[in-house]
Image (cartoon, grey):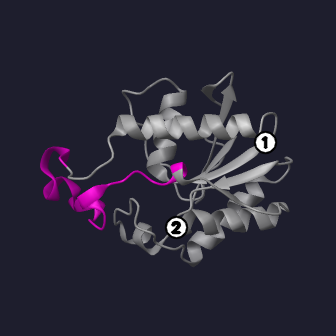
Amino acid sequence: MRLVRHGQTDWNAQGLIQGRQDIPLNDVGREQASEAAGRLDGLRYSAIVSSPLSRAAETARIIAAELGLASVEFEADLVEQELGAAEGTPWAELEEAFPGGAIPGIEPHKRLIERAAAVLERIGRLHDGGNVVVVSHGALINAITAHAARTRDQRPGPVANGSISEIEVLGGRLELGSELIAESS
């Protein structure tokens, strides 16, 4: 299973926290989606599954078109972590705005891991034996790669827009593949 982070949005470029805000791709993001498709080429994929947020959905559609996949499946549990009152805040001002990380309305990290693991395991079972591309978001991909590596106490660094991570679903368990296949520039 290949996990692709959506391409860049204007909010990414401006350093703003998106969370579940439905911010569309910008032109750079569309190029990153096309570049990701090029890095994914060479394998036969049975499906592409995406978060329904527009930045992920458009990334998935671009990848699907370039890989010759007829359609994109959408899975609500692939949405980004709810970041509550922090959404729209510049990352550089997060600590000042929310001292000690007390953000009202944030989805707890443990809940994010549980949601991400459950949806990826479900996708793995539905597409047993097939290569699947999953398009999602930075916090979800970070959480699931940490979970798959069994390092829940450590959060990996941020994944770049358009980056590709690999995980395997083995007997209902997530295992980290080559953690980072390629990263967009």
Relative to residue 154, is residue 134 depicted above or below? Answer: below
Provide the residue span drawn in magenta.
77-102
The quadrant the N terminus occupies is top right
Magenta-colored stretch includes residue 75: no
Are there few (<14), some (14-19), or many (20+) residues within 10 Å of tag 2? Answer: many
Image quadrant in which you'd find residue 41: bottom right
The residue depicted at 45 percent of the width and 69 percent of the height is 22
Query: Element at badge 2?
Result: loop
Residue 133: % across, % down: 71, 49
Say whether marks 1 and 2 touch (CB < 8 Å): no
Relative to residue 119, is residue 36 depicted above or below? Answer: below
Relative to residue 61, is residue 163 depicted above or below? Answer: above
Query: Element at badge 1?
Result: loop
Closer-to-camera residue (46/151):
46
The residue depicted at 20 percent of the width and 46 percent of the height is 101
Closer-to-camera residue (127/1):
127
Tag count in the figure?
2
Which residue type does callout 2 highlight?
A: Gln
Between the residue at mark 1 and the residue at mark 2, the CA separation in whole angstroms equals 25 Å
Residue under label 1, please give it: 131
Q: Which mark is residue 8?
A: 2
Task: Specify whether 126 is left or right of 146.
Answer: right
Magenta-colored stretch includes residue 96: yes
